Image: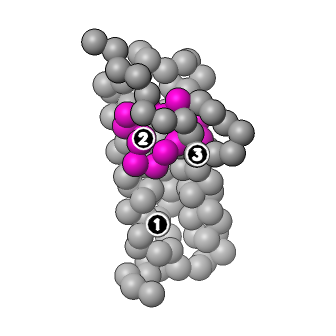
Amino acid sequence: MVTAPLCSCRVVGCGQDVPATLTREVLCLDHFIEQAFTRMRKALELCRQCRPLDRHVLDWLLADADFALRLLAFGGRGHTPAQRAKLLELVLGLANLQEYLRHHSVQVKLAD
């Protein structure tokens, strides 16, 4: 049984369907990927500037990686090759960020 999408992406002017796995964020897959890349780039820039990272940001990035891996493992056939490539690029970028954090002295703020 095929279920209809619950709503459209919240990004102004998008109108793409929101997959069931992203209803909480109200984002289409393309905009989820775009926002995850933005979070990853911002975290990496903070690392490069030797500025502390917020623990919540790290948790969010970990959740992004987990979500992307689950999509690739279980739902990849329903996505375009370009979307699968971007998901893989996101996972690899997040793994590289994790390695950067492991090898550098980056402070993590536990609370504000």
Q: Nearer the viewer, mark 2 or mark 1?
A: 2
Disc marking residue 57 = 1
> As drawn, which residue projects farthest toward the left?
1
Q: Tell me which segment is drawn in magenta.
A: 17-31
Compare residues 17 and 37 and report the one nearer the observer: 17
Amino acid type shown at disc 3: Arg
The quarter holding residue 109 reads bottom left
Judged from the image, the secondary structure of the residue bearing numbered disc 3 is: loop
Amino acid type shown at disc 2: Leu
Spot occupied by residue 89 in the image (x, y as percentages of width and height) = 55, 36
Q: Which residue is mark 3?
A: 10
Judged from the image, the secondary structure of the residue bearing numbered disc 2 is: helix
Compare residues 27 and 101 and report the one nearer the observer: 27
Q: Residue at x 52, y 42 (%)?
A: 27
> Is the C-beta separation of discs 2 and 3 under 8 Å?
no
Q: Residue at x 43, y 64 (%)?
A: 58
Amino acid type shown at disc 1: Val
Judged from the image, the secondary structure of the residue bearing numbered disc 1 is: helix
Q: Earlier in the sequence, mark 2 or mark 3?
A: 3
Name the image quarter holding the C terminus: bottom left
How many angstroms separate mark 2 from mark 3 (CA)?
Answer: 11 Å
For label 3, the crowd category at 10 Å Cα-Cα, with few meaning under 14, some 14 to 19 and many 20 or more, is some
Q: Earlier in the sequence, mark 2 or mark 1?
A: 2
Spot occupied by residue 32 in the image (x, y as percentages of width and height) = 53, 43
Please determine whether, in this image, residue 69 is positioned above or below residue 51: above
Residue 86 visible, this angle: no
